[in-house]
Image (spheres, rainbow, N blue to C red):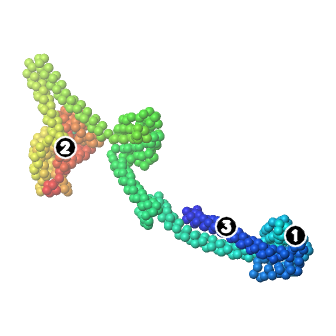
């Protein structure tokens, strides 16, 4: 508490008052003492002179004791401050004294004091001395009585100075009281005055403490226009600016955090020592970290980069491919610079698994197409060569060869038209001619057309097409193409004597068409890939049956374009069930 400015100010005020009073009091008392002493000495000198005038004629040639005695008794009185008058002869022997009891001075006794000695030589002398017993101060004065130039006697006067010191003592008391009162008043005034200075400072301090805790909502009232007022105003301004700036910063931070949190790319930030300081959720997910702690070692071994070395050798952007268990990641390492100084690294991770897969698929597709086209071409080429080499003359052989060539050409045509169709579907160039159609009618037509093939393989073909099933909004020709493909698959991949069952039913919002066969089935591992282009379970067998492996992929594209779904279930050796779901028209309307 006593360390505060308030107490310092109060102490300074009090000390100043004390000092001022001391100095003033000192001077005052000194000059008062001098004045009183001068006064006393003047009056004693006057008296001595008067006495000297009176007794001079009684001193010469021999002192006349009686006269002198009578004379001096008249000079003492209650109003006089002179205590003793002693008349001495020229040799300082006491002639007469007002000390009637002769306690101090006795007639005839030589009185040698510094003053009387001096006066005996004709000089006036004065001194103040303290009585060693009573501690009282007295003024001693010796005055020569002259006859012409000759000293004929000495007047020795002693005055008490108690009155003077009593007065000075009174003044001292008054001064002391005045000092105390002045100090008390100064104390109060100083306290009040310094409070007006320290009050706002305390308030600023309290508010600053609140600010340090993050509370910026307080303003300090500005009470004056002086320096303190200006300080308060400035402080309020500072608070507002600080609040605004902090809000801006936290807004920016939130934005960046939101971006980092939600971005699909993984971001890892490292400091200048190569330590990880931030990793966003996408990066965690890509590196399969979940909530595990990530350490530098792990990251360095994954990227095959030593961060410290990399940071030391003028780092530039670097691209590294990482293969994790189930993904391919492209990682870009870039230096984080601040004014040409590398302050860290940023690693951006991109999941390019899909891209990679698509790339692979594209390559595979091109290879497949080339292969599928080359096979019939090779056959055509070799058969025509054989024919040209002479087989043409053998009519029967030539006819069978030409049949093969024809079939292969048909196959190529089918393949090319399938590919064209797929490309149109991919590029959304297919012209859909959708209208409400009854799937029952479409199925009937398909069954009619395919029944011949089933009969050829002695397959039992059953169907259940109930009435009153909702129509679907679809392109009739395309849907028929899908049904035909699935039906032909069922017949193709079901051995002779097997059975095929087709049925139609309403399934909630959808119309469901099911083709069930008792064929060879599809192994589990192939089921997921069955809709891929050119994918066939048994390539040679399928090809022998005239298949290109594009039928199901086209079917899927067509069904998808109708917001439908195509599902396949199969048990190898037992049969396959293909279901097609198309939205019922009530739902579309
Ligand atoms: N009902 C089925 N039973 C057994 N396997 C089937 C059945 N349907 C399709 N598959 C298998 O799926 C593959 C792909 O069928 P998809 O219809 O796409 O081609 P494809 O019939 O070989 O040729 P395309 O239909 O173009 O003439 C077939 O090669 C066959 O191995
Ligand atoms: Mg097929």
Task: Give the Cα distance between marks 3 and 2.
Answer: 118 Å
Residue 179 is left or right of residue 467, and the answer is right
Disc 1, SS: loop
Residue 197 in sight in this render: yes
**Relative vertical location of residue 98 with respect to residue 221 in this rendering, above or below:** below
Q: Residue at x 34, y 41 (%)?
A: 350
Between tags 3 and 1, which lies in front?
1
Please, which residue is most extreme toward the front here? 148
- First in sequence, mark 3 or 1: give its number: 3
Tell me the residue that label 2 is attached to: 557
Quadrant position of residue 540:
top left
Quadrant where the N terminus sits is bottom right
Along the line of sight, the residue nearer the viewer: 167 or 463: 167
Q: Residue at x 37, y 38 (%)?
A: 331
Tell me the residue that label 3 is attached to: 26
Along the line of sight, the residue nearer the viewer: 66 or 480: 66
Residue 282 is left or right of residue 213, and the answer is left
């Amino acid at each position: 508490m006593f360390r505060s400015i308030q107490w310092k100010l109060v102490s300074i005020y009090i000390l100043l008052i004390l000092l001022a009073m001391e100095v003033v009091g000192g001077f005052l008392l000194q000059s008062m003492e001098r004045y009183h002493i001068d006064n006393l000495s003047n009056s004693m000198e006057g008296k001595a002179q008067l006495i000297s005038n009176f007794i001079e004629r009684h001193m010469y040639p021999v002192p006349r004791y009686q006269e002198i005695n009578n004379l001096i008794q008249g000079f003492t009185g209650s109003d006089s401050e002179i205590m003793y008058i002693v008349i001495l002869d020229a040799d300082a022997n006491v002639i007469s004294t007002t000390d009637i009891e002769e306690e101090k001075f006795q007639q005839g006794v030589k009185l040698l004091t510094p003053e009387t000695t001096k006066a005996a030589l004709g000089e006036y002398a004065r001194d103040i001395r303290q009585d060693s017993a009573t501690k009282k101060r007295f003024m001693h004065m010796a005055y020569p009585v002259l006859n012409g130039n000759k000293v004929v006697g000495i007047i020795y006067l002693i005055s008490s100075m108690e009155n003077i010191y009593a007065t000075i003592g009174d003044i001292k008391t008054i001064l002391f009281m005045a000092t105390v009162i002045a100090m008390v008043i100064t104390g109060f005034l100083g306290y009040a005055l310094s409070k007006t200075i320290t009050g706002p400072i305390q308030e600023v301090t309290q508010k600053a403490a609140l600010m340090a805790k993050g509370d910026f909502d307080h303003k300090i009232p500005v009470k004056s226009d002086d320096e303190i007022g200006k300080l308060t105003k400035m402080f309020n301004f500072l608070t507002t600016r600080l609040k605004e700036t902090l809000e801006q910063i936290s807004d920016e931070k939130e934005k960046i955090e939101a971006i980092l949190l939600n971005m699909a790319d993984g971001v890892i930030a490292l400091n200048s020592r190569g330590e990880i300081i931030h990793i966003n959720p996408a990066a965690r997910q890509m590196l399969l970290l979940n909530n595990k702690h990530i350490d530098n070692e792990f990251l360095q071994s994954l990227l095959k980069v030593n961060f410290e070395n990399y940071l030391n050798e003028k780092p530039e952007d670097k691209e590294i491919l990482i293969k994790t268990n189930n993904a391919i990641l492209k990682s870009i390492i870039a230096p984080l610079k601040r004014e040409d100084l590398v302050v860290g690294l940023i690693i951006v991770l991109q999941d390019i698994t899909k891209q990679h897969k698509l790339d692979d698929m594209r390559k595979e597709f091109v290879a497949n197409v080339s292969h599928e086209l080359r096979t019939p071409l090779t056959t055509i080429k070799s058969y025509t060569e054989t024919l040209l080499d002479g087989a043409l003359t053998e009519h029967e052989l030539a006819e069978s060869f030409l049949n093969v060539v024809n079939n292969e050409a048909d196959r190529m045509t089918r393949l090319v038209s399938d590919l064209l169709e797929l490309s149109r579907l991919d590029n959304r160039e297919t012209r859909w001619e959708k209208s409400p159609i009854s799937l029952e009618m479409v199925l009937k037509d398909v069954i009619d057309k395919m029944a011949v093939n089933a009969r050829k393989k002695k397959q039992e073909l059953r169907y259940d097409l109930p009435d009153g099933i909702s129509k679907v909004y679809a392109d009739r020709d395309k849907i028929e193409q899908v049904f035909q493909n699935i039906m032909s698959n069922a017949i193709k991949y079901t051995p002779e004597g097997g059975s095929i069952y087709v049925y139609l039913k309403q399934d909630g919002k959808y119309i469901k068409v099911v083709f069930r066969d008792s064929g060879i089935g599809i192994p589990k591992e192939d089921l997921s890939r069955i809709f891929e282009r050119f994918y066939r379970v048994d390539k040679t067998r399928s090809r022998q049956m005239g298949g290109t492996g594009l039928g199901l992929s086209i079917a899927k594209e067509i069904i998808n374009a109708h917001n439908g779904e195509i599902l396949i279930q199969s048990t190898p050796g037992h049969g396959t069930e293909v279901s097609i779901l198309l939205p019922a028209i009530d739902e579309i309307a």
